[in-house]
Each structure stands twice: as structure tokens, then as C-alpha cells.
Amino acid sequence: MPALSDVLAALDALWPPERAEGWDAVGTVCGDPDAEVGRVLFAVDPVQEVADEAVRLGADLLVTHHPLYLRGTTTVAASTFKGRVVHTLIKHDIALHVAHTNADRADPGVSDALAGALDLRVTGPLVPDPDDPAGRRGLGRICELDPPLTLAAFAERAAARLPATAQGIRVAGDPERPIRTVAVCGGSGDSLFDQVRAAGVDAYLTADLRHHPASEAQQHAASSAGNGLALVDAAHWATEWPWVEQAAAQLDEISDRKGWALRTHISRTVTDPWTAHAASTTHPTDTPGAPR
């Protein structure tokens, strides 16, 4: 079995930490570099449920997309929920390693996995990495859909292919309009609307779309020529979960090539924070005292 330091070197080659955003907190949170690694669990969130899953599995390493301490900390006391995660992992000799925005910008990265889950053909990054001469790395992806689908059918595909969440899939746009080109961004993507508009795609699939950016995108589309931009909004966790499968497959390939006796596992624990959804049934004009 390889040492933890060897596995971490392989992971850093896949997702170099220097390519993470400056505000990010990636890399190894805990773990003995000399410890042997036989089982690796991949997950989106380093929450207690996932730490407990790693313990039950007998994992030696937990690799997550989201950081445990994104904004830093002054304590890892077990009386705090994040500190309890650290204590659980260290008590059971489980290392924790994070690949966040460095995995977003990689080739392949988080958005490649999202595109693959939806059977989209990637043609390039949405926001190219200026340090990549090949022009393949960067945030988000521009994709083609062949054959085209209506917006409603594409949303149904997203609902069927991505992990189920309480939110499901939200859509803005004419459900019957044809969708041929799509921009995707795993995770929160409403900061990239300028780049999406510049790409001239038919639809944008991402997560965490807020009211004002989404409304402004629709108003911008209505004031421009053509059909404008359709929006498909999925749950944050659901858009990033396909990366877990992709990342495990990447480490499997490295393990086979190096002759390591590694076993990789994929967490299917749903860590999306929303647990239920109640569809609205009342229109504002049906509410007593509402303007008519």
C-alpha cells in the first residue's frame, strides 16, 4: 500500500493547489504523511455524516470537494461541529484532503463531470485559464447538445441524471424553445453571467441562482434580439456530485498504473442541506386583500 504522502502527491498532480482561488482553503487538513493508505472515500462535503461513513468503511483517506475550514479557525475543539469532524477522523487514523476551486479549474474538472452526466459534448472552458496554453482548463464549460432538446426536455434530463434533491430543477424560459448549446458550471455560478452571455449559448445550467442576477439575466435576454438565455438551476450538491465519481476513477487509473493496492469508494450520502420541498399552489391574486 502507498504512503499517504505518495497518494497526496498524486492528487496534487491532478488538482495543483496553486491553481485554487486565493480565498480558497485546499489541501490536507489532517493525516500522517507516513501512514499507509488502502481505502479512499470521495465525497462532496466533509460533514459528520460523511466522517462517520469513512469510519464504517475503514477508510484511510477522505477526499472532499468542499473545504472544512474555508474561513479559517482558532479551534478544533470537539464541542464545535467542525472540530468533532476533525476529532472523529484523527481518532480513527483517517486523513482529510480537499480539492475545491483547483478541481473546478482542472482538465478534467468539476464542470466536465457535470457535462458528462448530462451527455453534453464539451467544446471548451467558459472562463479559460490564462496560464493554460492548450485552452482546456478554466471555470465552467461550453457544451453542445446533440440532438437538440426542448428546454423542458433538457430540464427533465437534468432531473433524471443528477442526484435527487428536495429542490429538484428550476427553469426560467420558454419550455418549448430548442436548446442546442449549453454553458455549465458546477456549484454557484451566477457570478459568470457576463461570460455566459458572451458565449452566446441557449441555456445555462448551474446552481444557487439568486433572484436578482437571474431576474437581470432574463430582462437582459428580453431586451436583446433572439430568444435570449434560458436558465436551469439545480442544487449545489447535485451539480458537484458527478465529480466524486470522476475523481475516484482518476485515482483508480493512477493506482493501477503505479501498482498500488488502493480501493476507492464513492459516498452516496446526500449532504444537500435542504430536506423537503412544498410546491406553491396559491397565486398572489388568490390571497385575501391582494391587489386585483
Image (cartoon, rainbow, N blue to C red):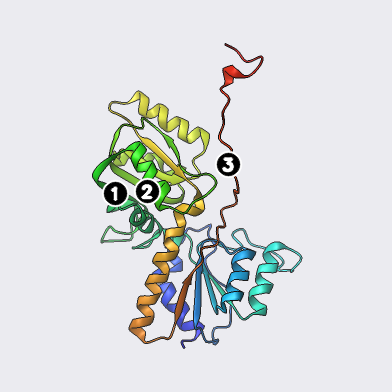
x and y percentages locating residue 175 in the rendered image: 36, 32
Residue 43's place in the image compared with 144, above or below, is below
According to the image, label 1 marks what residue? 143
- The reply, left or right, for residue 215 in relation to residue 175 is right
Q: Residue at x 39, y 28 (%)?
A: 220
* Residue 277, disc: 3
- Mark nearer the viewer, 3 or 2: 3
Specify the amino acid type for callout 3: His
| Residue named by callout 2 | 184
Q: Is residue 68 above or below residue 251?
A: above
The quadrant of the picture occupied by the C terminus is top right
Mark 2 residue element: strand
The residue located at (25%, 61%) in the rendering is 134
Q: Is residue 258 left or right of residue 69?
A: left
In primary-sequence order, the first of circles 1 and 3 is 1
- Cα separation, mark 1 vs mark 3, equals 30 Å
